[in-house]
Amino acid sequence: MSLRFHVWSIGCQMNAADAQRMTDELEQYGGEATTKLDDADVVVLYSCVVRQAAETKVHNELERIRHIKEKHPGMRIALAGCMVEDDTQRLAKRYPFIDRYFSPKIDLPLRDQVLDFLDLDAPYRLDPADAERVPIISQPVTISQGCNRRCTYCVIPFRRGRERSRPTADILRDVRALVNRGSKEVVLLGQIVDRYGRDIGTSLAKLLAEVSEVDGLERIRFLTSYPVDFDRGLMEAMASLPKVCEDVNLPVQAGDDEVLRRMARGYKTDLFERVVGDMREVVPGLGLSTDIIVGFCGETEAQFAHTLDLLQRTRCDVVHVAMYSERPGTASPQLWTDDVPLAEKRRRLHAVEELQERVSRKINESLVGSRQEVLVEGTHQGKWYGRARNNKLVFFEDEQNRVGELVPVTISSASSWSLQGTRRRPASPAALNL
Ligand code: SAH
């Protein structure tokens, strides 16, 4: 019987990317993915500790595994992602059943991680062509690891280490392999993706140009961006490379300069607004998302109101909002108390969500009647769905399976979260006059 494995992940896109790569790798060794933990011979967990809520979910999963492993002592467990600290002793004491730790600071090739973990010999590896796979249309590709910034709330740099870019050749090899297996879009990932290449004498703009050359690849996205590092050259590369989508994720975190200073973000709101203004000028049709933390240490009602004002002015397409969650080991707990009560954090979270729901609905409604190019990813409740270039989720009906195709869709209605469309061309003004 073949090896059954269960790969679980939570948190950021990087974890999702690593989990996907691990799944691919294990399949190449003849493994068979199972969604049921109870059935697995091998379990790999990509953990997240960016907020307490995520960390708690990882602990719950580990407790579940503790019980299952009592019944299946042969089951092998690996823990990856940001729960893995430099010193794994504390974790090993709490969860003695974990067999391996994959530190996000160590860029061990997957093949070595797997061989080490499974005690397999390389000859067991299948030819990739032997494995029958349904292509995943849009695939994440990690292009840099780690982060050199020290935002006072953020634990990621402590767990993922210093910033390091992957060589362009390795990235191109990954992208080509994905395209050969049917993928049409890649999402290039880094903590501050705009800084790609600064340590190895290249740049994200150059990488985008090289990835654009991959035949069969239709679209390129990248995230997460950082206001200070998003330069004009990158905007111009976006505008001039047809495969690069008009889509940017630019976290601002707060709309108040004093809060930004305490977060050690290294910019003020006016810089953020200037960068957004430049982007919109250089890249028409841009889809913009941002991240906000509400209830950071000492955030007053008036400071929070500045965040709402900024969001009102900037009019992002999507806002990811989270309540501040104190992370041990970061600077903020040493400097300030986590003094915004939970109920107040929740109220602020909802205030952002409500405002954004209105803004998003207005933006989306303004797209009704427009023609959007959709990369079809799959079906949901009898409709095809995919993303427009600006990253809007679009649903439409069609008799034919168009998964993996770029399809022009006329938008007929909109909500805050998605667009509905039709394959029919919009009625021409002349036709309407008849
Ligand atoms: N490198 C990115 C963010 C990575 S973490 C940046 O420069 O912003 C993803 C998101 O999680 C962040 O944008 C932030 O909004 C949120 N986040 C990070 N630490 C947090 C914390 N301690 N509490 C609440 N949200 C947090």
Image (spheres, grey):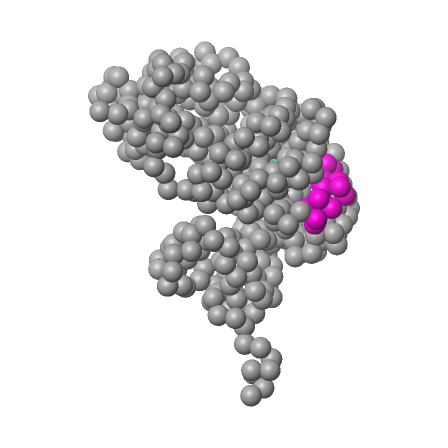
Q: Residue at x 59, y 53 (%)?
A: 390
Q: Residue furthest bottom?
A: 434
Q: Residue 130 in the image: state x and y as whole percent.
A: 34, 31
Q: Residue 121 in the image: state x and y as whole percent.
A: 36, 14
Q: Is residue 252 above or below residue 422?
A: above
Q: Is residue 120 above or below residue 298?
A: above
Span colored in magenta: 227-240
Q: Nearer the viewer, residue 280 or 239?
A: 239
Along the horizontal axis of the image, is 170 left or right of 228? Answer: left
Along the horizontal axis of the image, is 364 left or right of 95? Answer: right
Q: Residue at x 23, y 20 (%)?
A: 72
Q: Is 236 in the magenta?
A: yes
Ligand 1 falls in which quarter?
top right
Q: Residue at x 36, y 17 (%)?
A: 123
Q: Is 190 in the magenta?
A: no
Q: Quadrant of residue 42?
A: top left
Q: Is residue 9 something one can see in this rendering? A: yes
Tally of marks: 0
Q: Is residue 92 above or below residue 413?
A: above
Q: Is residue 60 something one can see in this rendering? A: no
Q: Nearer the viewer, residue 262 or 384?
A: 384
Of the 4 image quadrants, the one containing the C terminus is: bottom right
Q: Residue 242 in the image: state x and y as whole percent.
A: 64, 50
Q: Residue at x 66, y 40 (%)?
A: 209
Q: Nearer the viewer, residue 311 or 193?
A: 193
